Image: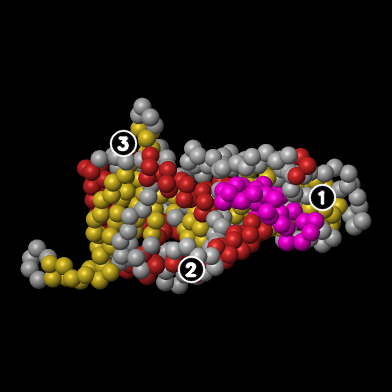
Amino acid sequence: MATKMILPILGESIQTAVLAKWNYQPGDPVKRGDEIAEIETDKATMALECPANGVLLEILIPEGSQVRTGDLLAWIGRPGETVQEKASPEPAAQTIHAAPQADPQPEPEPAATRRRISPAARRMAATFGIPLDQLQPRKPGLRIMTEDVKRFLEHQQAQQALQPGFSALEKLSGRLEPLNTIRRLTGERMLASVQQIPQFSVTVEADASRLLAAVDLLNRDTTAENRITLTALLVYLTARALKQNPSVNARFAGDGIFIYDHVNMAIAVSTSRGLVAPVLSAVECLTLREVAAQLNRLVRNARDGKLEPGDLEGGTFTLSNLGPQGVSQFTAIINPPQAAILAVGAARPLVTPVASGGTRHIQSMALTLTADHRVLDGADVARFLGDLRREMETYGER
């Protein structure tokens, strides 16, 4: 008897996803646990595991289509086995938005002229104002997908560039790169953040000499897999500073300020698909090596597209470190509903005067906290940054 492949529950806040890729085709042998497909949510790309041994009998949902939890995606069974039940030809489509605006929707088409088009392609066409009757699939009989919409737009831009009356900029050649789900939702959330949250930023310089020396010392005779990074050490010390300043580990709650009991640190990680922020839970309860081990796993899974939904939920504070990319200082945007985000720059050599006269060489690091002014004021931020700087500059003394 054939086995249904159903889209499982992905997380408390995730009900829809885009089926990004099928790793197997009908007729291919598969085993239980094989990564048979990849789905893309608003937070990450994740692998779907095959539910049974056999062959992939039939794919019911094409790549690029949006699906909901519980949708029938495919059938797994014995070679040559037939199945009767089919998925709906048009899976219900719903887009999750951080901002209140919804994607533009096309006008309903008459039944006689309705085209076979994936929900993702239909939304893209509506976004760019493309009539559906102008779109053609890659091959006759196939469903219209997002790449067909992209091809139409590229052709349209090329034709416009040849017409008189366009500015020099409009005539420049190039290509359209449609936003994937992660980049689109990140953009919407960050736009909502700056529009809805009164944000301000404060920067201090800290001497990171002790931290850099500690990282070298801690990683002697350590494998790359167990390495303690500077980011891990910063996460560990930032959690200590947050416990000293609990109002920074908080969120605005309408008629009050909600202060979290635990420090669940979201770490900004750049991937080929966009920025994600996996979460280390209850950091204040972890040792430095436990922080490093969990962080290494999360970063590796983020870049391999293997994060679980739970890895991205429950953050109370975010740390973004662009020091490894050589950025000396930057200002980050708050990740709602959190009240603050810490931006860390690269350590750079600096000569500074000392009270007894003369100078000394330090490794100066810029720490910039962006805060929600409804929750925190300048003095609150200054106290937190002062405590964090003290944690960094006295590390190893206790």
Tell me the distance, in whole angstroms, between the alpha carbons under discs 3 and 2: 45 Å
Which residue in the structure is indicated by mark 3? Answer: 374
- Disc 1 is placed on an element classified as strand
**Which residue is situated farthest in the front direction here?**
164
User: In the rendered image, which quarter contains the C terminus?
Assistant: bottom left
Question: Tag 2, which secondary structure?
Answer: loop
Instruction: For marks 3 and 2, give the one nearer the viewer.
Output: 2
Number of numbered discs visible in the structure rendering:
3
Please tell me which residue lies in front, 19 or 170. 170
Please tell me the numbered disc located at residue 172: 2
State which region is magenta. Answer: 117-146
**Of labels 2 and 1, the one closer to you:** 2
- Quadrant location of residue 389? bottom left
Q: In percent of the image, x 88 and y 47: which residue is there?
A: 83
Q: Residue at x 37, y 50 (%)?
A: 333
* Picture quadrant of residue 215: bottom left
Q: Which residue is mark 1?
A: 75
Residue nearer the viewer, 146 or 353: 146
- Can you give x and y, in whole percent of width and height, for residue 80 in the image? 92, 56
Residue 397, placed above or below residue 195: below
